[in-house]
Image (spheres, grey):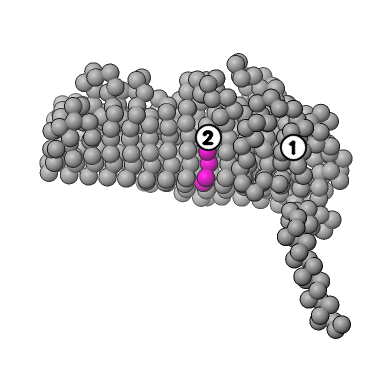
Amino acid sequence: MGAGAIGLVVLLLAAVTLQAADVPQAVLGQPGVYSVTSFGARGDGTTDDTEAFQKALNEAGKTGGIVFVPSGAYLIKGHLEIPSQVTLQGVFQAPPSLTGAIRGIDVANYKGSVLLAVEGKGKEDGPAFIFMHHDSVIKGLAVYYPEQDRKNPVPYPWCIAGEGDNCSIVDVLLVNPWQAVDFGTRPCGRHYIKGLYAQPIKTGIFIDKCFDVGRIEDVHLWPFWDVPLMKDYTYKNGTGFKIGRTDWQFIHNTFTIFFRVGFHFLAASDAGPGNVVISNSGADIGPCAVLVEKCQPHAGLQFVNCQFMAGIDIRDTNNGPVKFTNCGFWGLPKETINHARVLGNGHVIFNSCHFITWDAENKGEPCIYSNGAALTVSNCDFMNADKKQIVLGENQKSAVIMGNLLRGGAKIENKSKGNIQIGLNAED
């Protein structure tokens, strides 16, 4: 057999090997690829594997590489630090659910790469369970807090935190963290979060001090660890996204449910407010879907093709544009009076949206109440025929309400002496 034929056979055998096993397992032993089990990790749910994990991560950090976590339940009594240009990778190729395992099945029945976090119970301000440095990655893992109390949840430090550009979280499940992802306490530019399912109790994802285009997509935040108990707690106390300063942030295909606030845009950031484009996303069943304290006046916030079963609250501290395009609003809880309450010096726009099921207790409250600088409502469908559509307060400076479908006739109340333009609306 010639050298060329031998080389072809070797390549074919290598291809078969890669198809027959996980890619990380196939390349174990190659430069830059390490298994935590080679450093003494047991994955039996009772042995403390912290030291073994950190040794593997430190070794990979010398040259950059992958630390592979085979299937098992790995008890981590301390915390982990991922060096720059290192990936901590489990076996999952998509975010798992682990629904059966997290409801009382013993650790022998965990499937996949599961980390058990216990450090910092009862306090928020300790080190994060996993801390990332620039260009590091967490992929294919699940994290579970086995000592968290369903009936009386207690604080823990952040589950994942980062510092530096290009931190990435891909195909990860965070079962029941008190706080899920902190990419805001320290600068984390160009962060990338894709395929994150999390059931945070207090806070889902915190973004701040991001000065260069962060990206978040395919994120699912809801309390399915224990829906009857956790939904009540998060409904009163939880926030899905907390967003301060971020420049050119893109958020796509995300979902929150049972949070007091779905998307909270902060005024208190030391670095200033942010600008964000949010598309194909939703905030379901909560008092407030979107709370805007402040956004950047030159760029602001854009919601495109989104759905909301909670209210929009634009505070008087806001001075930037907030735009809702092709969005659906329905199903408000009783404690949320209006689909949107608009204050502040920014321009708020609703275009090609539809609204239904507001003023559940029939108190004569409008779908949209505005008493700020500028409001535009155009090409929208107000689908409840017996309810008031819009009220403009005494301090409303300007408004354009045009080209809308007002079911049951126009029920618009204008208390303003500002520049208000209302016309070309169809009354069905």
Expressed as whole percent of the image width and height from the top left, the position of residue 246 reads 49, 43
Instruction: Inspect the magenta stretch and tell me whether residue 274 lies in it.
Output: no
Q: For the residues carrying marks 1 and 2, which lies nearer the camera in this image?
A: 2
Q: Are marks 1 and 2 in contact (CB under 8 Å)?
A: no
Residue 68 position (above or below residue 14): above
Label 1: how many Cα within 10 Å (few below 14, some 14–19, many 20+): many
Query: Who's the residue at 66% across and 29% down the image?
Result: 102
Q: Nearer the viewer, residue 186 or 220?
A: 220
Give the quarter of the image for residue 380: top left
Question: Nearest the camera: 153 or 272?
Answer: 153
- Is-magenta flag for residue 217? yes
Q: Secondary structure at mark 1?
A: strand
Residue 237 position in % (x across, y down)? 50, 22
Query: Which residue shows up at 43% across the image and 42% down it?
Result: 281
Q: Which residue is mark 1?
A: 80
Left or right: residue 419 versus residue 307 is: left
Alpha carbon separation for disc pair 1 and 2: 24 Å
Q: Earlier in the sequence, mark 1 or mark 2?
A: 1
Asked which quadrant contains residue 403, the reply is top left
Amino acid type, callout 2: Leu
- Residue 324 is at least partly visible in this image: yes
Q: Residue furthest top?
A: 152
**Point 77% across, 32% down: residue:** 108
Residue at horizontal 45%, vertical 25%? 260
In this image, 370 relative to 139: left or right? left
Residue 71 location, x and y as percent? 76, 42
Going by the numbered disc 1, the residue's amino acid type is Leu
According to the picture, the residue beneath numbered tag 2 turns out to be 221
What is the magenta range?
Answer: 216-220
Prevailing secondary structure of the magenta residues: strand
Q: Sort mark 2 into few (<14), some (14-19) or many (20+) by Cα contacts within 10 Å.
A: many
